[in-house]
Amino acid sequence: MEEEQINLDKACDPILIYKRKKDKEKKDAKKD
């Protein structure tokens, strides 16, 4: 249960969201 809470906290972390977004953009760019 606690682990789930940690994951939720991470999901709400703006820096991690930003990094994930950047990683996704990199992957999307590779598709072209």
Image (cartoon, grey):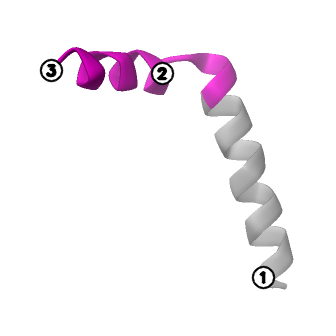
Q: Is residue 7 above or below residue 24?
A: above
Asked which secondary structure carries label 1, the reply is helix
Give the alpha-carbon distance from disc 1 to disc 2, as whole Å.
27 Å
Which residue does the numbered mark 3 point to in the structure image?
A: 1
Which residues are the magenta region? 1-16
- The quarter of the image holding the C terminus is bottom right
Mark 3 or 2, nearer chain start? 3
Using a 10 Å C-alpha cutoff, classify the residue at mark 1 as few (fewer than 14 neighbours), some (14 to 19) or many (20 or more).
few
Q: Which mark is residue 10?
A: 2
Mark 1 or 2, nearer chain start? 2
Q: In front: mark 3 or mark 2?
A: 3
Q: In front: mark 3 or mark 1?
A: 3
Residue at left offset 82%, top offset 60% = 26
Which residue does the numbered mark 1 point to in the structure image?
A: 31
Badge 2 amino acid: Lys
Badge 1 amino acid: Lys
Badge 3 amino acid: Met
Using a 10 Å C-alpha cutoff, classify the residue at mark 3 as few (fewer than 14 neighbours), some (14 to 19) or many (20 or more).
few
Quarter holding residue 31: bottom right
Quarter holding residue 9: top left
